[in-house]
Amino acid sequence: MDNLMKRITRDVDLSFAILLSFCVYVFFAMNIEVFFSHNISFAILERFAVLGLVGLALTICIIAGEIDLSIGSNAALCAVIVVKLTDPLGAPFAMLIGLSVSTLIGATQGFVIAFIRIRAIVITVGTLMLLRGVALLIAEEKTVMLTDFRVPDFITTKVLMYFSPASLTVIFIFICVGIFMRYTKYGREIYAIGGARKEALTAGIPLRRPMIIAFALSGFCAGFAGTVIGLKSGTAQGLGLQYLLLAGTVAAFVGGVSILGGKGGVLGAAIGALTVNFLNTGLVFYALQVHFVQLFTSVLLVIVIVFQTMSRIFDSRQARKSLLETIDDRKTALLEKKRSVLGK
Amino acid sequence: MSTAIQENQQPFSAKFLQFYKDRTLLAILLSLFAVMFVYGIFFTDNYLTLTNFKAIIRDAALYGIMAIGLTFVTLSGNFFLLSLKETASICGVTFAMGMATGFGSPDLAGNFMVSLLAALSVGVVSGVIQGYFVGMGGNPIVVTLGGAGILYGIGAWWSDNLVINFTRPHDAEWLGTGSFLGLPSITWSFILIAIAGEIVLRHTNFGRKVYLVGANKAAGKATGHENFSMAIIVFTICSVCCAFVAVAFVAQMDSAQSNYFSAEFGSSGDMTILVIATVMVGGNSIMGGYGSTLRTSLGAIFIAMVDNMMVLQGFNSGPRIVGVGLMIVFSIIVFGLFAKGSRAQE
């Protein structure tokens, strides 16, 4: 019991994420009969393939203490490239090209951020627009379509009851990134520059390497999300993947990252993405319009932000209180000592 | 003290150089202006006409007014709002509701003042709430991203995602399509708001506080100017500017819908990003404390000018978006390189 309490209080945000996702799932499972079934679980995992990746991309950036706004445009660009090249070159080669373009864009952003020492939101607003324009240019402002639908059929086939090739790949990426972030030197560097940048730099950690790695990873994840969307539906547009930013941010924040950086992890990102998926899938059954989905997702985001801010304020108050108590204790001890000395 | 003495001893040319050094970004912007202008005169048909210039300033006015509001937020060090177009859309829906139905009471239908006040107060409320969260210590980007979804959701819910029409003649025509001394009302509003913003920022107590809090949050806090009240005030100013633009736009179109400002607004895809681009291209520091509304207005006119030229040369929306995107990235990198090592970059 004691051990459990310790686990909960050690990472309050993650515990809150698990609680929140549990609540959302139970709410829909109670209200909708078919929600707790194999097919719905498959559908949720299918959505997870897209949203989880976007959430992961934002999580990595936010752990590094920055936020990448260009994720939607990056995903759209990659989707357009992959869908356009799949017919002439075949899916694997098209994916290779699309993903390397996305990763390269991410790495370039990371380099610029570390080189000029500018905040990421500043440069990524610019690239948001730039990449959107480039995607429109490549797609020639039309909807790009596949002619051969064997690839979409393949990546949505059911494997092992709950999975499809797409979601299996995404889960594999999650495990790889998780191991990378947790157990390698490069992953720990990303945490270090996010949590305490000045201290990390003073301790001799370079700024450029972790920043480039973090943004390259996030670009790769965003690109892969775009690829999955594009290949699954067989179509891609230059505009239109902008909703990924909101959904990904919600997933990342529900998963317990802190905007101050250095906190959170891949497990949290997965839980956050699942929570958003539960919400989206559940709302489908109420036959609501799109703007309601957006409304409820935003409400979820606001709930999480309020919780995080409150817990931060509570923590700092608690720290201040304990500091004041320590000072008081020392003061009384000193006064007593003085009194005893004077008394003699 | 020592710098003041030094400045007095410098010859005039050195002073001029110093001035140029201080205002490098403004100088770069102005020279780009000149280059674009000359290019436009020689290589684009129908460019050097009065009608075209009126069209440019009119285009610039719509997002220029929003950008002037956003400049206050940026100068105070609160980055920017991602909920600009959503604020505008909900205010537009409110205004159109007032003009069309009078919020349920037929007596008030078509009453300009009531509708305007309703739209502006919706703007004030959304600004105050978002500013409150930011002032409490929330990150402006995340808070306004959430706020954007909620505002859009409420606006679409309220209007059932339908187009709300009201018929001409109505009381708001003078604002939407009317003109005064040959210039449209919206252009006059742009000019007046730009001048007012400049006066407020330069010559009032509040304006100087905005710069102080933006330049150095810790110093602001130590001298009693906390970011809490500042965030609320600047977010309110920005949201009211959005509301005003929404009212003018709706009055021009005689109708409103919750996604009027989304997707393909103007040329550059997205109103919010276009407004943020305007603030950045003008050369304001996103970290706060450096910039002015004059720069923002120049940035708006510059973007409108380049966009207009590309339209006249027959470009599609793809290259135009690339053009604006390149402008933003260029201005950010130039600004970043100039500010490297100074206190403007934290």
Image (spheres, rainbow, N blue to C red):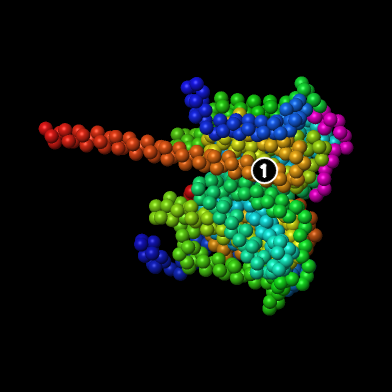
Q: Mark 1 points at which residue?
A: A296
Residue furthest toward the left?
A344
Image-based side of A166 in relation to A306, left or right: right
Work out whether A69 lies above or below B49. Answer: above
Residue situated in front as seen by the camera: A261 or B239 = B239
Q: Can residue A197 be seen in this view?
A: no
Q: Which image quadrant is residue B253 in?
A: bottom right
Q: Which image quadrant is residue B238 in?
A: bottom right
Helix, strand or loop at mark 1: helix
Quadrant into which the N terminus of chain B falls? bottom left
State the residue at coordinates (18%, 36%). Answer: A338
Q: Give the range drawn in magenta.
A: A141-156
Work out whether A115 lies above or below B107. Answer: above
Residue type pointed to by label 1: Phe
Circle 1: is it few (<14), some (14-19), or many (20+) Cα within 10 Å? Answer: some
Subunit under mark 1? A
Q: Can residue B202 be seen in this view?
A: yes
Percent coordinates x, y for residue A326 in the rendering:
33, 35
Work out whether B262 lies above or below A166. Answer: below
